[in-house]
Image: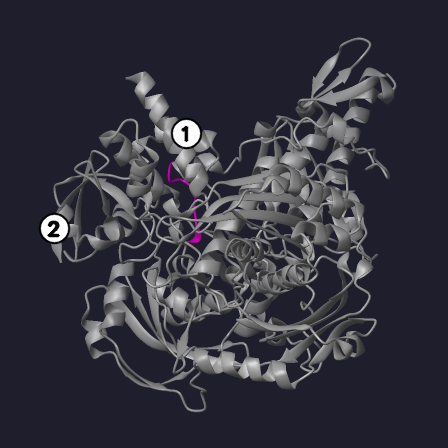
Amino acid sequence: MAKITLKVNKKEHTIDADPQMPLLWAIRDIVGLKGTKYGCGVAQCGACTVHMEGQPVRSCSIPVIGAANKSITTIEGLSDDNSHPVQAAWIEEQVPQCGYCQSGQIMAAVALLQKKTSPTDADIDAAMQGHICRCGTYPRIREAIKKASKKMTVKG
Amino acid sequence: MEPKDISRRKFIRATGLSATALTLGFYFSGESKASTIIKGEDAENYGVSLNSWIHIDTNGKVTIVSHRAEMGQGAYQAIPQMIAEELEVNLDEVNIIFGKGDTVKYGNQITGGSSTVRGTYKNLSKLSASAREMLITAAANKWNVPAAECYAEAGHVIHRPSGKKMHYGELVVDASKLEAPKNVQLKKIEDYKLVRKPLPRQDTPLKTNGTAVFGIDKTLPGMLYAMVERNPRLRGKVKSYDDTAALKVPGVKKVFKVTMKVFDTDREGIAVVAESTWAAMQGRKALKVVWDDTGFDYVNTEDIYKKMKAELQSKEGLSAKKQGDPDPILAQQKTKLDVVYETPYQAHACMEPLNCIAHHKGDSIEIWGPIQAPDWVQGDISQKMGVKKENVIVNMTFLGGGFGRKAFLDYTHEACLISKEAGAPVQVIWTREDDMTQGPFRPGVSYRAEGAVNNGEISAIKFRLCGQNIGHWMGSKKDVPNDSVLEGFQPHYFDSIKNISFSDVPFETPIPIMWWRSVYASTNGFAYESFMDELAIAAGKDPLAFRKQHLKSDRCQKLLDKVEEVSGWKNRKPKQGYGIAITECFSSTVAQVVKVSKDATGKIKIDKVWAVIDCGWYVNPDTVRAQVEGSIVMALGAATNHEIHFKDGLTVEKNFNTYRMPKINEIPPIEVFIMDNNEDAGGVGEPGLPPFTPALTNAIYDLTGKRIRKLPFDLAKV
């Protein structure tokens, strides 16, 4: 066990945990933010995606010690009122069905749009193909990313 | 009916609502399925608990209970949307809460068989209209005007001549003193304001900011976490185990053996209870278990399919349906078709792995989890744990997918056993590997199809199905055919095919099996609609025209016309393959056309899918479209990729690296159309799945001349 400082959504948490515990379980079980999901545990599905220092990462496959003192953003950190343009686009396109994978999908989409404000279909394919949705919301995810891109570019 | 001790106050308290209000619900009287609408306070006189109900408080706030699970299919939106329509309130004034498992109160609560809307809309519409009429009457009495001069709109009653207006909240106390009307007039489709409109789902905002509470997200004070190392051979036992190392893992509290029935055999495993999910996982890894597989058949996939093939050649099976007699006709034919189709076992692979919280408190048990059938869980737990039914409280959360798996009762029972032994509330979490390898699975099914055509028409068809029968697990007799042999087959084919038979060739393995989205229609549809295509080709007919020729009903004709029109079927060009299929299940018919071509590498590319659904009366067109889109994506994975293999009794595929889900870049454009009519509501969550695969393989035949009869197949290797 070790004392580790996590900076999640701009808030500091000092936790006492096994340094090898994946960041995912530290976020869920210790910090208590449940929006980040467990799907596969082996970085195959993307449901656990969060941002670490602005980069999308699979929190199920990063030991919590590796995230110490780094800036972590989870779905809860985007906005709590769905005002982030990607969240708004997700609602307009009515993307979610069961919704379980959508935190990860949204975090991946946000990271993509931060890098490329107007992504092509190929860009979307490349950024999103590690993210599984069993309900099959993919066509709507694509449309929502394009819509969010427009919102963000208009805003400048 | 004898009055029983259910006072209104008790009813209101049990539901957590204020007593000054109008509460209206219905109950099912006796064996007849007719519903009677009564007021909450009258429940005691009838000695019943109210079924799904509406509660309007003095602020005009409407609360309704959804006794169905929300697992992605949109029940959370569809139920309030249809209630708000007849009740004449704004949708944002309707608050929906999940009902708990209660057979007395709700009757059958299983969310399966695409039944949420089709099973409830008539009663819920009537209930809502009754409440509306009572509020109108209360207002008319207050104003001393004829009720006919009043109407309801947006949570108000309005007196048309004078323009006087009162909020529902001001009327509920008076309305609650009125008798519920015996007959109410439901609105006409052309007057709908909410139903049939593509309104946004109310659960969407909860699912875009991380606040939706799925089973896995629920926590309780003092809750512990558990993982279970189960016998990997599906239903074997534990011979011995060593927990020395496991108990040394920081955070691990307790390790013990769990024995539970899965259907008719015991499944044993070792539970590790800990302070966090991670500690439970680490403790589990440190276990040393010796398994006892005595008497267990080490099944292998190859053997299963070899045996099914042999059975189909040598046995007639149990007759499920026979019209005319295809045998003499087939015997006379010089050229008849006689082919076998094979479909694989499938995992449900819900994105949210199985999990359940149980809190065993001695003489009562409370459960939280992603549960498709809370009433079944209540009964099952009561019986298996020896706790009175009324003391088993089953709370529903959002489900991260269900597809049939979360209607099974193993994971909830296991959590109760673990909580009892641990003496604390415990959340049992299954890893992805547990979820994928333990089953139950969709059964793999093989089919033999014999048939002949004469003068361009089908003269005889003989279908034989061979595969495990899900019904056997639920106690159906082994000498009767599987009751789902016809699932997926459009019943109007029987109008034109005079000699046709279906039989079930019994087949058993120790593999646990369960419903999987669209159940047997998911495999039947492939066999039956592939064979229709083979017969059309044998008859020298256009496959779509051939369906029209054999499906003469007005609704089928309109549906086929529509899919022909939107897909541009008649304007097909060279080097494009077009395939059609039409299936019926859960009272809805769906036709799909798939268009394929070959890309530069020779791989089959799916250019487009057109789907037309006739589900009769429906609530939300956007939800209908979403369900059909999702069904097509699920079918695509099942057709071109997914198979659960068994080797020496072990499940081979364990996670998404080998059970590869379709990805965003593999999804063709999908266009969904809905037939508009006022027929009885049919299902929406499942019927879009079965026609996709045969439409795809029929399209591949059209393009390449190659007939695919075994699933899954690789689009790159056709």
Label placed on residue A89: 1
Task: Choose top left, top right, bottom left or bottom right for residue A53.
Answer: top left
Q: Is residue B473 above or below residue B82?
A: below
Q: Is residue B212 magenta?
A: yes
Look at mark 2 in the image and give the residue it sits on.
A3
Residue depicted at 35% across the width and 67% down the height: B654
Q: Is residue B608 left or right of residue B331?
A: left
Q: Quadrant of the C terminus of chain B?
A: bottom left
Judging depth in this view, the residue of B295 and B215 nearest the camera is: B295
- The nearer-to-camera label among 2 and 1 is 1
- Circle 1 SS class: helix
Residue depicted at 83% across the width and 71% down the height: B324
Q: Is residue B436 left or right of residue B474?
A: left
Check disc 2 and give the amino acid type: Lys
- Circle 2 SS class: strand
x and y percent of residue B597 in the render?
A: 46, 48
Give how far apart the Cα atoms at labels 2 and 1 are: 39 Å
Label placed on residue B423: none
The numbered mark, 2 or 1, whose residue comes first in the sequence reads 2
Q: Is residue B491 left or right of residue B343?
A: right
Chain letter for mark 1? A
Check disc 1 and give the amino acid type: Ala
Chain letter for mark 2? A
x and y percent of residue B686 in the render?
A: 59, 53
Segment tinted magenta in the rendering: B209-215
Q: Is residue A134 magenta?
A: no
